[in-house]
Amino acid sequence: MVEILSLKAGYRFRKKNVKAVRDVTLTIYDRDFLGIAGESGCGKSTLALAMLKLLKTPGYIESGKVLIDKVDIFNLSQEELSKVRWKEFSFVPQSSMNSLNPVMKIRDQIVDVIVHHTAMKIQEAHEIVYEVLRLVGLPLQCAHSYPHQLSGGMRQRVVIGMALALSPKFVVFDEPTTALDVVVQRSILEKIFELQKEKGFAAVFVTHDISLLFEISKHLAIMYAGEIVEYGDTKSVYERPLHPYTQGLIESLPSISKELKSYRSIPGKPPDLSEEIEGCPFYERCQFRKEICLKDHPRSKQVEQGRWVSCHLY
């Protein structure tokens, strides 16, 4: 469904050039549910925006290709992009609860999306509004409410419904449940999972909560310092993590079945992405580091069928 090839992107400031996404290559299959996990500042959201050509100034895309259904979207004009957005692919942003227009009713906002991206008339679009609300499990009277009259979880469902209104083949969710409490978060995730099975779209779910992805994703990509350091099917990554960073993330999760003597954490801090990284970006924090790791940047290797890792241990 989607191929991301050698994608490089970042942010240009007056005296700094932050390389937030560094040569990322990924494959997302038809009906796949890919989770992208990593700590804050590792480039997850930049990757999500860049892959859909949504990165705004001072952000920039340096190079690479993104093929969605074999079409390179970087070669499309703004007019051509407008025709395929929402119909072929859509995006649920971070803090999506706050992305609704506060002075428009929910019905008018959903209609606006449908009319702008299709040849439908307003009356036809009004009929789809109620289908969208039913789809995400909201009462139909929500159509006549303003965003401030809905709870955070309800606004979240509205945005997810808008993203799915035109039945896209590919949807990117950028930390859509970060601002919600765990009970509402669970209901939203169950709804996303249910809709993905029902509609059959391919999905990318970006989050810093790796435990969440162990439950819902089919494949898992671990991101560190702007790079994908490990990729594989979720069960394999969970049961046998290869990269020391992935191992550290999993070991830092508290267990509910064992006695917790102490929390384990990854020492140190990630590198500055505005500077060149000569060797392995995880070198300073790695307990298995070797001399080669200091000078030689590890390349992604396929160590077994469907498992990729960027580490000199392999």
Image (cartoon, rainbow, N blue to C red):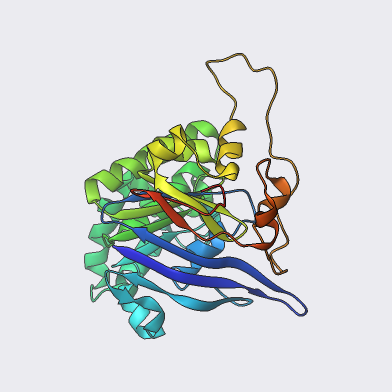
Q: Nearer the viewer, residue 137 or 261?
A: 261
Extreme residue toward the top, this view: 259
Q: Is residue 138 visible?
A: no
Q: Could you tell me which quadrant the N terminus lies in?
A: bottom left
Q: Is residue 290 left or right of residue 214?
A: right
Of residues 285 and 116, which is closer to you in this image? 285
Q: 153 above or below 67? A: above
The percent position of residue 206, horizontal first and vertical second, equals 49, 51
Residue 67: image x %, image y %? 34, 71
In the depicted structure, whether residue 209 falls above or below residue 8: above
Of residues 220 and 169, the one drawn nearer to the viewer in this rendering:
220
Horizontal side of residue 111 vs 186, given as left or right: left
The residue shown at (45%, 68%) is 51
Q: Image check: 244 left or right of 64? A: right
Percent across and percent down for residue 283 are: 69, 52
Inspect this view and state whether residue 213 appears: yes
Q: In this view of the protein, which residue sits in the foreground, 193 or 130?
A: 193
> What count of labels does the image hold?
0
Identify the residue at horizontal 53%, vertical 54% (top origin). Answer: 310
Residue visible at 41% across and 79% down in the picture: 74
Considering only vertical position in the picture, is 110 above or below 65?
A: above
In the image, what residue occupies the spot 37% across and 37% down? 190
Percent of width and height locating residue 314: 51, 48
User: Most extreme residue toward the front, as rendered?
Assistant: 291
